[in-house]
Image: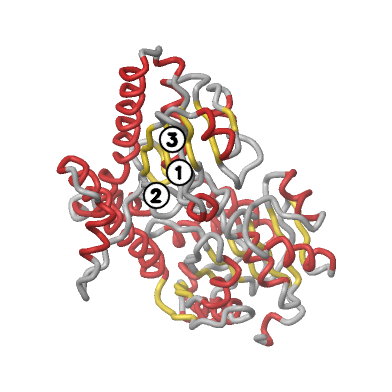
C-alpha cells in the first residue's frame, strides 16, 4: 500500500453502485473509510454491515469492513484526507447535463476541507465538470487555494477519475481494470494515483482532467453506436423476415466483424446517458453519436408495437376482449443478473404496456423484491416465472437473465412470444 495513505481517512460521497464498492475496496485494504449518503436508510443499512444493492460478494466485504471498524456511514461529511464524489449525473429535459448532485456534494464537503486534501470526481461527467467542481469548492472556501488559481502550489488537489466497471463484476474490475487519472495539475494527478494504488492492480494512466472526462464518454458512446447498429439491423431483419440472431452469428464468422446483439433498447446510467453529454457540448459535430442515441431510444417503442400486434393476434384468434389478454414481461433491469433499473428500456416498455393494458401485466424480475411504485400503481404484479407463464397470452422477453437462459420453457397453448433477446426463439 502507498505510504501516503497509511493511517489516513478516505471519504466516499454517494454510496450507490459505484461509491459503496469503492468504499469497500479501500476498507478491505485496512484504510479507514467514511461513507456519506443523503439517504438515512442507506446509511443505517450499511452501518448494520449490510448492503442495499445487488452486487456479488459485496455483502461479505462490507460486513467485514464494518465489523472490523474500517467502514462507517453517515449523512454529514466529516474531515478526511481524500474525498471521492460518486454521485449521479443525469440530464434534464432536452438532454442538458444536470450537475446539481455534484454541486450539492461539493458544497457539502467544502466546510471540512483542509490544506493538503485531495478531491476526486468519479461521477461520469460532461467535459469541464471537474473544473466546475473546483470553482464551486473555491467559492465556498476562499481561505484555501485551488489548482485553477495557484497551480502546483494549491492547498487542495483536484482530479477526475471515471469508473469503468461492469455491474455484477464491480469488485473484481475495480481492482483489475486500468484507471484513467486526470488531475488539474501534475501534483493533483500524482496524489490521485497514490490514492488508487491502495487497491488498484491495473495501470493508473495519467492525463488531464478534460481528456479523462471525455475518455469515459467516448467509451460509452462507442458502445452505444455499436449497439445501435445491431438494433437497427434487427428492425431491418424483422421487415425482411430474416432471423437477426442467425444473421449476426453468420456475419461474425468474418475475422474482422464483431456485431453486438440487439435488444429492447439501451439502459443504465452510462451508455444511455453519457453520449448526450458529448452531443450537448458539440451538437454540430456529433451527428453519428446523436443518431445512435435516437435509434436506441426508439427501440422500446418498436417492442411496444410488436406486443400490440401480438395482443391483436390473440384477440383475432380467440374472440376475447383485449382487456382479458394477459402479458408477461420477463425482466426489468437494464442488463442481466442485477437489480439496477436506471434508464432501463425493459422498465420503460413495462410502464407503457401497463398504461395501455391495466391490470394485465405480470412482471418476472428475480432480482427485486417489489415493483417500482410507478409500475405497481398501474396495476402490474410481480410474479414468478412459473406463475406468469401459466397465465400469459403474450410473453415479452426483455432481459436475458441467467435463470431465463438456462431453461427455455414450453409456453402454454396459444401463447405468443416477443423475444427481444433471442434466447427463447
Cα distance between the residues tagged 3 and 1: 22 Å
Front label number (2 vs 1)? 1
Please tell me the numbered disc located at residue 273. Answer: 2
The part of the image, by quadrant, that contains residue 219 is bottom left
Q: Is residue 352 above or below residue 386?
A: above
Question: Quick one: SS at disc 2?
Answer: loop
Precedes in sequence: disc 3 or disc 1: 1
**How many other residues sit within 10 Å of disc 1, few (<14), some (14-19) or many (≥20)?**
many
Q: On the picture, is 31 further left or further right than 363?
A: right
| Residue wearing tag 3 | 395
Residue nearest the viewer, comparing 152 with 375: 375
Residue beneath the point at 50% across and 27% down: 361
Cα distance between the residues tagged 3 and 2: 29 Å
Q: On the picture, is 245 further left or further right than 242?
A: right
| Residue wearing tag 1 | 343
Quadrant location, the N terminus: bottom right
Residue contact at pointers 2 and 1, CB within 8 angstroms: yes
Question: Quick one: SS at disc 3?
Answer: strand
Count up the numbered dots. 3
Amino acid at each position: 500500500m502507498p505510504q501516503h495513505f497509511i493511517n489516513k481517512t478516505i471519504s466516499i460521497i454517494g454510496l450507490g453502485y459505484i461509491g459503496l464498492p469503492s468504499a469497500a475496496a479501500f476498507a478491505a485494504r485496512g484504510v479507514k473509510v467514511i461513507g456519506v449518503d443523503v439517504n438515512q436508510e442507506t446509511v443505517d443499512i450499511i452501518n448494520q454491515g449490510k448492503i442495499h444493492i445487488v452486487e456479488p460478494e459485496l455483502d461479505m466485504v462490507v460486513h467485514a469492513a464494518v465489523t472490523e471498524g474500517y467502514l462507517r456511514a453517515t449523512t454529514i461529511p466529516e474531515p478526511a484526507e481524500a474525498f471521492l464524489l460518486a454521485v449521479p449525473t443525469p440530464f434534464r429535459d432536452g438532454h442538458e447535463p444536470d450537475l446539481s448532485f455534484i454541486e450539492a456534494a461539493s458544497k457539502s464537503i467544502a466546510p471540512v476541507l483542509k490544506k493538503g486534501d485531495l478531491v476526486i470526481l468519479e461521477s461520469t461527467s460532461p467535459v469541464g465538470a471537474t473544473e466546475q467542481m473546483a470553482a464551486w469548492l473555491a467559492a465556498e472556501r476562499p481561505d484555501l487555494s485551488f489548482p485553477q488559481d495557484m497551480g502546483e502550489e494549491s492547498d487542495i488537489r483536484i482530479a477526475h477519475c471515471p469508473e469503468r466497471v461492469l455491474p455484477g463484476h464491480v469488485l473484481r474490475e475495480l481492482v483489475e481494470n486500468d484507471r484513467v487519472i486526470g488531475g488539474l495539475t501534475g501534483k493533483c494527478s500524482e496524489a490521485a494515483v497514490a490514492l488508487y494504488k491502495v487497491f488498484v492492480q491495473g495501470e493508473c494512466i495519467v492525463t488531464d482532467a478534460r481528456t479523462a472526462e471525455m475518455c469515459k464518454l467516448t467509451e460509452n458512446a462507442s458502445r452505444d453506436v455499436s449497439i445501435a447498429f445491431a438494433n437497427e439491423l434487427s428492425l431491418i431483419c424483422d421487415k425482411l423476415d430474416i432471423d437477426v440472431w442467425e444473421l449476426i452469428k453468420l456475419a461474425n464468422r468474418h475475422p474482422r466483424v464483431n456485431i453486438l446483439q440487439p435488444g429492447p433498447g439501451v439502459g443504465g446510467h452510462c451508455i444511455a446517458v453519457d453520449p448526450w453529454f458529448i452531443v450537448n457540448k458539440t451538437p454540430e459535430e456529433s451527428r453519428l453519436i446523436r443518431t445512435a442515441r435516437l435509434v436506441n431510444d426508439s427501440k422500446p417503442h418498436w417492442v411496444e408495437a410488436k406486443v400490440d400486434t401480438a395482443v391483436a393476434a390473440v384477440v383475432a384468434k380467440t374472440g376475447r376482449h383485449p382487456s382479458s389478454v394477459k402479458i408477461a414481461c420477463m425482466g426489468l433491469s437494464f442488463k442481466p443478473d442485477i437489480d439496477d433499473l436506471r434508464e432501463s428500456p425493459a422498465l420503460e416498455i413495462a410502464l407503457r404496456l401497463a398504461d395501455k393494458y391495466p391490470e394485465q401485466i405480470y412482471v418476472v424480475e428475480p432480482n427485486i423484491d417489489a415493483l417500482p411504485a410507478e409500475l405497481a400503481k398501474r396495476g402490474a404484479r410481480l410474479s414468478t416465472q412459473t406463475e406468469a407463464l401459466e397465465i400469459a397470452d403474450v410473453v415479452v422477453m426483455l432481459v436475458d437473465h441467467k435463470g431465463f437462459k438456462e431453461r427455455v420453457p414450453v409456453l402454454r397453448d396459444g401463447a405468443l412470444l416477443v423475444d427481444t433477446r433471442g434466447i427463447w426463439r
